[in-house]
């Protein structure tokens, strides 16, 4: 069990786990490949990105078929380096979850998440996604909801 799954369990929310195989982190667009492997629309699967916003590490949760809009994210926003993201979250790239991170980072979820009854995000390891209500994700991560995807 990953820290992300433990966090969902502790919170008492409804969730489902989905395992997948055959997707490599080196794939050109890992999140799109994961959505395809699960047979889900790319807009329902959300990737977790870690970026530095004015020097503060921040988590952004955006749909697999879109990119983080760096302008909407904030002035002087740059994606975090792999080692920096892994150290701060406690997860390896390709398995970074917005839930159960080593250190709670400020989090923003793209507003399109609220268009779905449920969304999928990483469950904390490669090959595992957690499906949950977007409102539960927002509540558990204390996220702000905004238009952050382009």
Image (spheres, rainbow, N blue to C red):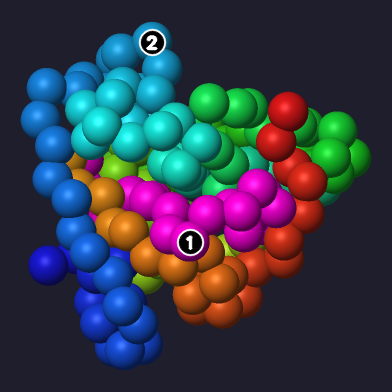
Q: Residue at x 44, y 31 (%)?
A: 42
Task: Provide the residue designation for mark 1.
Answer: 117
Report the magenta residues as a range: 108-126
Considering depth in this image, is 18 or 86 the residue closer to the camera? 18
Above/below status of 37 relative to 124: above
- Seen in the image, is 106 located left or right of residue 76? left
- Residue 59 visible to an observer of this rendering: no
Q: Find residue 55 and report its horizontal and vertical position in percent.
A: 75, 48
Query: Magenta segment: does it hold 117?
Result: yes
Q: Which mark is residue 28?
A: 2
Query: Which sits in the foreground, 84 or 100?
Result: 100
Question: Which badge, 2 or 1, is on the more N-terminal residue?
Answer: 2
How would you rate the neighbour count of disc 1 (Cα within 10 Å): few for under 14, some for 14-19, many for 20 or more? Answer: few
Q: Position of residue 108 (x, y in %)?
A: 67, 57
Q: Tell whether 148 sits left or right of 76.
A: left
Q: Is residue 49 above or below residue 137?
A: above
Q: Residue at x 23, y 35 (%)?
A: 38
Mark-to-mark CA distance, 2 and 1: 28 Å
């Amino acid at each position: 069990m990953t820290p992300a799954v433990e966090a969902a369990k502790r919170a008492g929310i409804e969730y489902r786990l989905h395992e997948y195989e055959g997707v490599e982190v080196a794939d050109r667009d890992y999140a799109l490949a994961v959505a395809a492997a699960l047979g889900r629309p790319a807009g329902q699967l959300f990737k977790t990105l870690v970026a530095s916003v004015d020097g503060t590490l921040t988590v952004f949760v955006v749909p697999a078929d879109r990119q983080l809009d760096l302008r909407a994210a904030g002035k002087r926003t740059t994606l975090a380096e792999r080692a920096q993201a892994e150290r701060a979250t406690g997860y390896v790239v390709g398995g970074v979850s917005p839930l159960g991170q080593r250190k709670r980072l400020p989090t923003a979820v793209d507003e399109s998440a609220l268009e779905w009854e449920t969304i999928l995000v990483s469950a904390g390891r490669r090959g595992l996604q957690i499906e949950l209500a977007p409102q539960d994700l927002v509540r558990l991560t204390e996220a702000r909801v905004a238009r952050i995807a382009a």
